[in-house]
Image (cartoon, grey):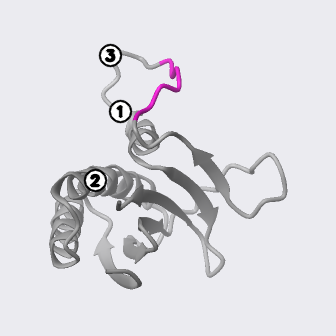
Amino acid sequence: MSGRTTRREFRADRRAVFGARRYVESVCQDWKIRAELTASAVLLVSELATNAVLHAKGGEGVFELCLRRRRGVLVVEVTDSSGLSVPEPASNVPEFVVEVPYAGCDKGFDLDCVSQSGRGLLIVACLAAKWGVRQRLDGPGKTVWAHLKVE
């Protein structure tokens, strides 16, 4: 099955992260996505939704979750309305894109072993075949997106 899209808006509070995870599980089940990919999508959304909740304080107080299935890829997008700016990419490309091998993640990140936060985007980088961030064009905020290989 290919060419499906669904969107849902959530209030930017910590309880919404649970709702976003359950929503992803339900959509993946409806779209007949295999269990291990569903688990990766749920973890990825948990990290992105948590970031959106933490950083949407100055915005509209909502975040949007969008799932798309296109040509062997599950696209996950979380859009927030925070006033925080997106880091500028090194070139004039409209999006910041990171590509990592799908099978694993060996990026040599220097992690603070005692910190209880700060690993969300590392988890995204390890799970996704490709991910990135783009500034919203319709207002303040950003969209963080990730591609998971379906096949």
- Residue 7, given in percent of the width and then of the height, sits at 35, 81
Tag 1: Cα neighbours inside 10 Å, few (<14), some, or many (≥20)?
A: few
Query: Which three-letter amino acid code belongs to the residue tagged 2?
Result: Ser
Tag 2: Cα neighbours inside 10 Å, few (<14), some, or many (≥20)?
A: many
Nearest the eye: 80 or 89: 89
Residue marked by disc 1: 117
As drawn, 65 above or below 55: below
Quarter of the picture holding the C terminus: bottom left
Q: Earlier in the sequence, mark 3 or mark 2?
A: 2
Q: Residue furthest right?
A: 92
| Secondary structure found at label 2 | helix
Nearest the eye: 17 or 12: 17
Residue at 58% x, 57% y is 133
Residue marked by disc 3: 114
- Residue 101, given in percent of the width and then of the height, sits at 50, 39
As drawn, 114 above or below 88: above
| Secondary structure found at label 3 | loop
The range drawn in magenta is 104-110
Q: Earlier in the sequence, mark 1 or mark 2?
A: 2
Query: Which three-letter amino acid code belongs to the residue tagged 3?
Result: Val
Residue 50 magenta-drawn? Answer: no
Residue at 53% x, 26% y is 107
Q: CA distance from mark 1 to mark 2?
A: 13 Å
Query: Which three-letter amino acid code belongs to the residue tagged 1?
Result: Ser
Q: Is residue 65 left or right of residue 14?
A: right
The image quarter in which residue 4 lies? bottom left
- Residue 86, given in percent of the width and then of the height, sits at 64, 55
What is the chief secondary structure element of the magenta stretch? loop
Residue marked by disc 2: 46
